[in-house]
Image (spheres, coloured by chain):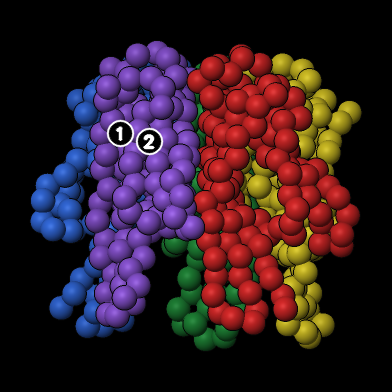
Chain colours: A blue, B green, C yellow, D red, E purple
Amino acid sequence: MNVMHTVILFQVCLGAEAEDKFHMVEVEGLTYDGKTTKVPLAVLKPSVLPSVSHLGGFEITPPVTFRLQSGSGPVYISGQHFISDDEDDDEYVFILFIYLFI
Amino acid sequence: MNVMHTVILFQVCLGAEAEDKFHMVEVEGLTYDGKTTKVPLAVLKPSVLPSVSHLGGFEITPPVTFRLQSGSGPVYISGQHFISDDEDDDEYVFILFIYLFI
Amino acid sequence: MNVMHTVILFQVCLGAEAEDKFHMVEVEGLTYDGKTTKVPLAVLKPSVLPSVSHLGGFEITPPVTFRLQSGSGPVYISGQHFISDDEDDDEYVFILFIYLFI
Amino acid sequence: MNVMHTVILFQVCLGAEAEDKFHMVEVEGLTYDGKTTKVPLAVLKPSVLPSVSHLGGFEITPPVTFRLQSGSGPVYISGQHFISDDEDDDEYVFILFIYLFI
Amino acid sequence: MNVMHTVILFQVCLGAEAEDKFHMVEVEGLTYDGKTTKVPLAVLKPSVLPSVSHLGGFEITPPVTFRLQSGSGPVYISGQHFISDDEDDDEYVFILFIYLFI
């Protein structure tokens, strides 16, 4: 069995009440050779860039963690999570909605 | 019968007369397992980011509601709504045009 | 005969001499059920957002009118217009270049 | 023989030493019916928008000229140029790298 | 054997501690005819544009070097690196994560 996970991220948005400083969101996950890596997704600041869209799609191997590397949020991450399976032809789609706040 | 709805959002624009504060637009709809969820679409502010484009496409299960989570608008959302049907091969396309104002 | 028109918009740019206020561009055209509708394309302001790119593609039924809903321009809209025909397999492509000024 | 040229533009970036005024880049080329046309690509200003990405792809008929319509640069344009040929199945790809400075 | 490398870049982000000046990232690599070339990827500045997303995909011939052409970083570059091989049908995918700091 070969299950593939693909994530398409749509938006990373700051909440209207976020402090006016830099909020960096990073993803922590496994690379294809099994190592843990951290990838920054976006750097947002209310007075400069409150919202980033069309972040593109990438394949992931769960588990994946989204984290605030700097700033305190709130940050909203949205997208879609596709799960496809070699054995059957079905593809499952879930709305991805993550809320980060420290 | 298996009807699929796909929404491609093009733009979220603030009206020229919008107040200079943060306006957050969110979508409320059903996830694939039937739960209600809210996903923020964009955070806009006239003096910082008055317009966001290419928000990407996502599959939805109607009904879907677009709402101002903060701010008073006006906010214009535009896109296309594709409806495809397993039984026939036709695909129907509608211009999506939503106006939010509190 | 079934002729399909598709428009891919690349850029909406303000001219360097545009006034520092909001310029909103809207499209007026027919929806798929024959009604006239107006969809905002972008809101630009020289000191905030002078240029928007990758506005995405949409299917249109001519005639379509691009208009300044607020502001005085000049605004430059560019893209490609694809015309395909069911009877032959050819697809015709035209550079779309629109100049708005009040 | 039917040779097709497609250009995918990735980025238009201002050099770090560019003056703080508007720099507008335009493309001059032939339309599909053989007329010369000018299409603005992006309007950049160091203190507002120093870099624009994902400008989309378009088909061109050489020759094509990129030009500064206003401002003095330096402006860096990058992308890929695909050349495909009906007679053989090969596609040739070149990195496109243009430097504009007045 | 014909191995093809494709890079899809997702994000270029400034670190929250970056100085408030312009940071220009460039790629140095080989063109398809074997010459070395430099292509600017993005120009970022904390108070203007701290993060750029959806930089698009391009084919590369290794080795490729990412470099700060101006500014001191830190800059985080993320994406995916696809390696496909003519002899077998497999495609290998690696998370691309680069950290630039002077």
Report which quarter residue A37 is drawn in: top left
Q: Position of residue B38 (x, y in %)?
A: 38, 44
Q: Nearer the viewer, residue C33 or D73?
A: D73
Say which amino acid is labelled 1.
Answer: Tyr
Q: Residue at x 35, y 14 (%)?
A: E19
Say which amino acid is labelled 2.
Answer: Val
The answer to whether tags 1 and 2 share a subunit is yes
Q: Around disc 2, counting alpha carbons within 10 Å, would you say few (fewer than 14), some (14 to 19), or many (20 or more)?
A: many
| Chain bearing mark 2 | E
**Position of the C terminus of chain A by quadrant:** top left
Q: Which mark, by number, is residue D53? A: none
Distance in Å between CA atoms under marks 1 and 2: 6 Å
Q: Secondary structure at mark 1?
A: strand
Q: Position of residue E30 (x, y in %)?
A: 42, 50
Q: Residue at x 24, y 56 (%)?
A: E94
- Residue C26 visible in rendering: no
Residue contact at pointers 1 and 2, CB within 8 angstroms: yes
Q: Nearer the viewer, residue D28 or A39?
A: D28
- Above or below, D93 relative to D41: below
Residue assigned mark 1: E76
Residue assigned mark 2: E12
Report which quarter residue B16 is drawn in: top right
Q: Position of residue D93 (x, y in %)?
A: 53, 61
**Position of the N terminus of chain A by quadrant:** bottom left
Q: Position of residue B39 (x, y in %)?
A: 39, 44
- Above or below, B73 relative to C66: above
- Residue A65 visible in rendering: yes
Q: Nearer the viewer, residue D97 or D50?
A: D97
